């Protein structure tokens, strides 16, 4: 009876947490839908394409600054969430390592922007986009996910997006204002992230004086290989718009950005769902493999069924969705077939995200690193080839091919783990 009562309380808490967390993440999904039509209307497809390149540039750099904090950092916090001293040590070490990396990344990225012609031609927009990287450095969501404090995760998400959306609607008034869009996103992230950081610091009475440079350097060394793989993964996710812009120009990049934004809604949702249940899946598998696998299968299965229903609705309302993004009726006719092809990406993306949880939960980091590096190179080669051969359609077809490839490799790597689970049950 007592066990059933405790189980019921845990289940109610998980539902409540998901509701709170889901609300905050819904703001993440909705905010681009509010600003992109405005940017497209004011700045045109070319301006939107340039904003997309700057945003993707920042997202790639973010991986270097995060340096595994959202994978191993969150996992370590979730396992040691009852030990204040361990939390303080992880908090200080990870933030100090992120600060070192932030300084290095900002210096290198400024040199890249000023020296490479492709970036130099839009240098001010790209330099302003670095504020997004600073905002992510401050953002303590990796820690909050580990302690499963979804209330503060939501506060940070909602506040940052309110600042961002309001600022874009107020200040982006002319075509040349596109260069400030990513800066406004960064400012919102910096303000909201700072509030979350201060809450953690005061709530746990952490002391930054206990930070040790040697621990931060050791962490950077130990996480190097994982970060390299995450960097390749970020290239896989965010570099395509740069390739499209390089091959087809800013206008084609703007068209790609509109369709990609819808795909990114699903990618953001899958990442949100990944982060929400990741700590719980890791803990469950750590305590009992079979229970953990069952937990993973049920949660991801129900989530995937929901996404399929949404994709069906999007497929049959494609023209209305494109018109919502302020695409002209003439251009919408040409983009509808491409949009429908692009909707195939989330079908496979949902599977790859779910399998990636098990890759990390079973500590197959080395395999993940190799898979990510190889699949990224494969993806960019296919993208460049198909983009030159069949235009913008090739960009979306290449993504689908790459997702299928990743799923197959993940399944082969996890085959031994599933087999071991079955043998334990017998």
Image (tube, rainbow, N blue to C red):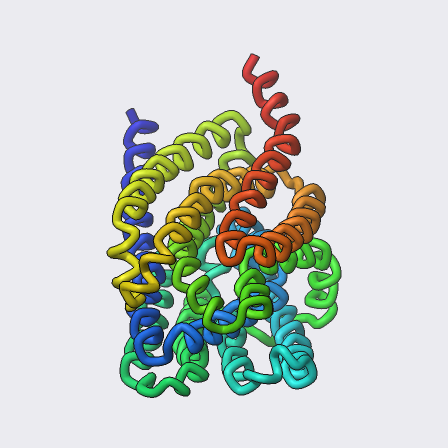
Q: Is residue 13 visible?
A: no
Q: For the N terminus, give its image quadrant.
A: top left
Query: In this view of the protein, which residue sits in the foreground, 45 or 388?
Result: 388
Q: Is residue 283 above or below residue 182?
A: above
Residue 352, image x, y percentages: 52, 41
Residue beneath the point at 60% across and 34% down: 408
Q: Which residue lies at the image location 62% right of the left edge and 77% below the top edge? A: 118
Figure check: 425 above or below 236: above
Q: Position of residue 14 (x, y in %)?
A: 33, 43
The percent coordinates of residue 104 (x first, y second) are 68, 77
Which of the 4 image quadrants contains residue 176? bottom left
Residue located at (51% from left, 25% from top): 290
Query: Is 247 or 400 nearer to us in this picture?
Result: 247
Residue at image coords 65%, 33%: 413
Q: Is residue 70 visible?
A: yes
Task: Tell me the quarter of the picture where residue 347 sits.
Answer: top left
């Amino acid at each position: 009876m007592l066990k059933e009562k405790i189980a019921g309380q845990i289940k109610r808490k998980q539902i409540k947490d998901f509701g709170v967390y889901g609300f905050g993440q819904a703001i993440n999904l909705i905010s681009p839908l509010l600003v992109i039509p405005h940017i497209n209307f004011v700045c045109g497809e070319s301006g939107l394409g340039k904003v997309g390149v700057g945003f993707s540039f920042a997202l790639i750099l973010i991986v270097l600054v995060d340096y595994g904090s959202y994978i191993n950092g969150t996992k370590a916090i979730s396992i040691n969430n009852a030990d204040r001293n361990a939390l303080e040590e992880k908090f200080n070490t990870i933030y100090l390592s992120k600060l070192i990396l932030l300084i290095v990344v900002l210096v290198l990225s400024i040199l890249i922007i000023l020296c490479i012609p492709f970036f130099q031609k839009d240098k001010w927009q790209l330099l302003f986009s670095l504020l997004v990287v600073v905002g992510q450095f401050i953002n303590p969501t990796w820690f909050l996910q580990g302690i499963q404090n979804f209330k503060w995760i939501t506060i940070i998400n909602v506040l940052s997006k309110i600042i961002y959306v309001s600022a874009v609607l107020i200040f982006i008034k002319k075509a040349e204002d596109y260069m400030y869009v990513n800066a406004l996103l960064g400012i919102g992230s910096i303000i909201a992230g700072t509030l979350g950081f201060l809450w953690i610091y005061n709530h746990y009475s952490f002391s930054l004086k206990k930070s040790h440079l040697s621990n931060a350097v050791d962490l950077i060394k130990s996480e190097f290989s994982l970060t390299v793989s995450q960097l390749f993964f970020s290239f896989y996710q965010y570099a395509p718009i740069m390739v499209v812009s390089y091959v087809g120009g800013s206008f084609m990049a703007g068209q790609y950005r509109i369709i990609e934004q819808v795909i990114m809604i699903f990618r953001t949702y899958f990442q949100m769902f990944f982060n929400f249940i990741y700590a719980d899946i890791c803990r469950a598998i750590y305590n009992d493999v079979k229970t953990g696998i069952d937990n993973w299968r049920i949660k991801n299965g129900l989530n995937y069924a929901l996404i399929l229903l949404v994709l069906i609705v999007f497929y049959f309302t494609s023209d209305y969705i494109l018109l919502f993004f302020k695409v002209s009726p003439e251009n919408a006719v040409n983009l509808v077939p491409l949009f429908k092809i692009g909707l195939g990406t989330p079908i496979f993306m949902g599977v790859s995200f779910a399998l990636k949880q098990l890759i990390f939960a079973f500590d197959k980091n080395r395999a993940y690193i190799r898979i990510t590096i190889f699949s990224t190179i494969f993806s960019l080669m296919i993208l460049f080839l198909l983009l030159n051969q069949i235009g913008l359609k090739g960009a979306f077809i290449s993504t689908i091919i790459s997702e299928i490839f990743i799923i197959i490799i993940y399944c082969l790597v996890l085959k031994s783990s599933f087999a071991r689970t079955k043998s334990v049950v017998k």
